[in-house]
Image (tube, helix red, strand yellow):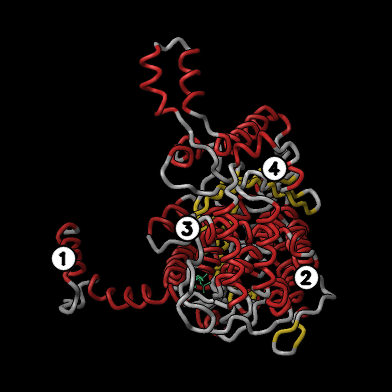
Amino acid sequence: MSQPITASLKALKLHLQQNPVDIRQKLSSETDRFDRFNLCLEDMLLDFSKCALDEKTVALLVELATAANVEEKREAMFAGERINTTEDRPVLHVALRAPRDANFTADARNVMADVHRVLDSMRVFADGIRQGEIKGKTGKAFTDVVNIGIGGSDLGPAMATLALAPYHDGPRLHYVSNVDGAHIADTIKALEPETTLFIIASKTFTTIETMTNARTAQRWIVEKLGQDAVRDHFCAVSTALDKVSAFGIDPSRVFGFWDWVGGRYSLWSAIGLPIMIAIGPRNFEAFLAGGHAMDEHFRKAPLEKNLPVMFALLGIWHRLICGYSARAVIPYDQRLSRLPAYLQQLDMESNGKSVTLDGKDVACVSGPLVWGEPGTNGQHAFFQLLHQGTDIIPVEFILAAKGHEPELDEHHNLLVANCLAQSQALARGRTREEAEAQLLAKGVKKDQAKALAPHRVFAGNRPSMTLLYRQLDPYTLGRLIALYEHRVFVEAQIFGINAFDQWGVELGKELATDLLPIVQGRDEGSALDTSTKGLVQKIRDLAQ
Ligand SMILES: O=P(O)(O)OC[C@H]1O[C@](O)(CO)[C@@H](O)[C@@H]1O
């Protein structure tokens, strides 16, 4: 870790020690606190007034970003430098959502013509499917589209398709990812082969889950409609065009993308084809425009007014200075129910590392545990721990001011009231005196109230942020996703790690390949460790 970063972190820790902030007390004494601790971009607002910090904290955090050369690193990414050093690749997912006349270069070549050539071909294909001009082998329009992919070839499209349900006006979308046969079996059971199109989405076109599911889908179509139906009922999204061709997919139905697009950053590329089929090209373009708007803001806004930078610095404050090991993402929006899962890959596959860019052990902890579920459901599941548990877990609430069902406004009012109440309860808590007084006011006897009070105390002083916007439309979803992408990038610069490789997924894959013949009974596996050997034997016994 560089000396400036070390010094900056030290100053932040000292500031925390010397100036501990009591959120509860600040919220009641500082009536202008909301105005002082929020950031806006258009209708999007990040309220961080319920975090335990003051203006000096913010100033020191901005100094940390400067010490970490965040602006220079950001420019290197946008300039197409090979910042993914272990794979020797540029990182240019920002180009995927840029306008046709933009200039992003990879290997000294402007990539925008390629990007928009693919986008144009996606648009023609999606319109053909949506308007019933592109049909199945028996001449029927497609009513169902099944995306087969995993990780970044699934989580992003699946999350965005659900998030933008109010904008669906095309075929029904289904997502199959797990190699567990249940996933594809339960999906195709409800479908008609004649009206089903499969998208095989895989950057590498080698991922065992995706290829296994793809072959099963292919068998299903061939059995029902004949070998020559594959051409009509399959298309592919990949960078590995040779492997796609070997699988038997017609080249005219292959949508490519490039090595400078990381899997978990790829939903803006042809990996987003299922989203475009579901919501139409115009809405998909609005989604891209939202991402681009956030890119422009990230690129131009001064650090202290920069939403992704400040969002990252607050994450660093909680992770490196306050010492919180996890963060909870709680969208108060049922249609964002897959957002936490998507962010788990985006954040934890990017920053879950312990080696720095120059190959040394990290000098600090790195990416936090990211988890979450939508509110209000979380309140009936794990909020107990958030309020009264022994661990403090910063919460990121995500909330739209407007829902999509005006006739159900009362529902939305309840959603909003609960979201605000939870962040208020986390901050304010309830003292023992308040707990006892409340019990007495309910007629509980004094000695019983004294005995019960400790159980009803809320420590409070638990930090949360609230990300607010007008309504979850394609443009806003684009801004939201790009905001989180850039937040991960900025945190990585401070951790000093490469956010864009994922070597940690390799060992499990290698061991699974070695174990497969043993599980299949083709190899005794004499060299297995005692645990795996015992489990393999028990599985054989139970499966008899
Ligand atoms: O799109 P592919 O190449 O099938 O990879 C799927 C996923 O597997 C990983 O390589 C490892 O989880 C992810 O980074 C990627 O999104």
Residue 25 in percent (x, y) is at 61, 37
Q: Position of residue 34 (x, y in %)?
A: 73, 42
Determine the image quadrant of residue 517: bottom left
The kind of residue on which mark 1 rests is Gly
Between the C-alphas of marks 1 and 2, the distance is 54 Å
Q: Residues within 10 Å of mark 2 (few under 14, many from 20)?
A: many
Q: CB under 8 Å between callouts 3 and 1?
A: no
Q: Sequence order check: which comes first, mark 2 or mark 3?
A: 2
Against 417, is 131 above or below? below
Of label 4 and label 3, which has the lower sequence position?
A: 3
Residue 369's disc is 3
**Label 3 element class:** strand
Give the labeled residue for mark 4. Answer: 400
Identify the element where label 4 is drawn.
strand
Quarter the C terminus occupies? bottom left
Q: Residue at x 38, y 22 (%)?
A: 452
**Is disc 3 surrounded by few (<14), some (14 to 19) or many (20+) residues within 10 Å?**
some
- Check disc 1 and report its element: helix, strand or loop: helix
Q: To which residue does mark 2 refer?
A: 98
Measure how far apart labels 2 and 3 are at the Cα level.
31 Å
Q: Quarter-wise, where is residue 212 in the image?
A: bottom left
> Which residue occupies 29% across, 78% down?
514
Q: Is residue 396 above or below residue 92?
A: above
Q: Position of residue 87 (x, y in %)?
A: 55, 84
The residue lying at 57 percent from left, 48 percent from top is: 20
What residue would you read off at disc 1? Answer: 534
